[in-house]
Each structure stands twice: as structure tokens, then as C-alpha cells.
Image: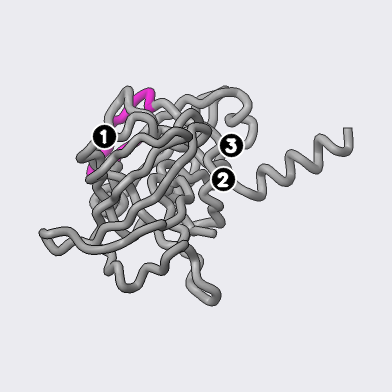
Amino acid sequence: MFTGIVVDIGEIVALDELESGVRIGIASNQDPDTIAMGASIACAGICLTVIEKGRLDDGRGRFDVEASVETLARTTMGTWRIGTRINLERSLKLGQELGGHMVTGHVDGVADIVTRDQIGDMSHFRFKVSSDVSRFIAEKGSVALDGTSLTVNEVSGDEFNVMLIPHSLAVTTWQDRQTGDRANVEVDLMARYVARLRDSDN
């Protein structure tokens, strides 16, 4: 379980194709000694399991993960290359402050950035998602985009927008994102369960 509060920006340093997916090496400023084997880390919003860890020659930590063909097909992971930067979040510990909202790391779909506009020192992003995802997105509700917990400002059909403050831009990969880019989307867990209960009553 995660909160959508990014703790580091990782960099893809290795990509090895597997018969059933891919193995990925990720450089991080996180101390590898504090990362347990088998730990869950949200990588651009995707919950992945650490299968190996160590240090790079430049002093940065490194951890390796594996992902299936299914994950590659349903997320932006298939576009990652050596040098790609991704948001990272360590899993939530019992008693830890919940700064964002409850995030599972199970991506529901991919959003296209329709526009990015600068409004003062903030950035306004408009996204488009498929209708099976947009039904769970509500004005003033929460959404996780590339693992970042954000508040939805407005919804119009299959499009919605969010505003990122300077701090969020500075500590995440959103500083680099532009119109035409894509992002992993996880809808609010509560919205998903409310919709399920509503459907069950019909």
C-alpha cells in the first residue's frame, strides 16, 4: 500500500527482455541497505517487487524488478528506455503519516496529456482517459498519476484536469512532462468500491 507521495526520482539503468516480460534495473538515491528483498516499491505508480539490490559505481543505490507481459501492455512501462526517469515511492509502514490518499499500485489504465499550460508558477494538466476509467474520476476527488497523489479540479466527459504546485513539479518527473506524453492512472480506491456496490444493487 502507498500514499502517492513520491520520495525519489529513479532512473532506468538496465532493461533485459524475459520470455514472459522484462527485468528492469533502477538507480535510486534510496539507501539499498534499507530496502528489503521482496519489498514493494511503486515505480511510476506500478507496484513492483525488489528481486535484487546493490550499489552503482557512482554511489547511487540500485534495485531490480521484474514485470510481466500483462503489466507491459497495460501501463507505460513498455515505453521505458535506458535513462527514463520514474517516480518512486516506498511502501507504507504501519503508523506512518498518510500524506496523500490510499494507493495500491495497481494501474487502471493510461492517460494521455492533452494540454499542459503554465499558470503563474503552477502547471495545469488536462488528461484524457478511456470511458471505463473516467467513470471513477470525480471533481475534487483523488487520482494517482504516475504514482503521484493529485486532486482532480474538473471533469468533462473522458477528460479531467489537475494543477501541480512548484514543489510537486520539483520533486517528481512532472517537471519533464509535456503534451502528448502518457501517464499511468490509478483511480481512487473508494470510488471503485462505491461503483461496485452501486452496480451490485442494480
Badges 1 and 3: C-beta atoms under 8 Å apart?
no
Element assignment for label 1 = loop
Q: Start and end of the magenta stretch?
A: 113-124
Q: Is residue 61 above or below residue 174?
A: below
Q: Where's the N terminus, which quadrant?
A: bottom right
State how far apart marks 3 and 2 are (Cα).
Answer: 7 Å
Estimate how packed mark 2 is, as few (under 14), some (14 to 19) or many (20 or more) residues with alpha carbons within 10 Å.
some
Callout 3 amino acid: Ile
Determine which quarter of the picture holds residue 194. Answer: top right
Determine which residue is flagged by label 2.
141
Res. 137 mark: 3
Disc 3 is placed on an element classified as: loop
Looking at this view, name the residue that lies furthest to the bottom.
95
Q: Which mark is residue 81?
A: 1
- The C terminus - image quarter: top right
Asked if residue 122 can be seen in this view, the reply is no
For the residues labelled 1 and 3, the Cα–Cα distance comes to 30 Å
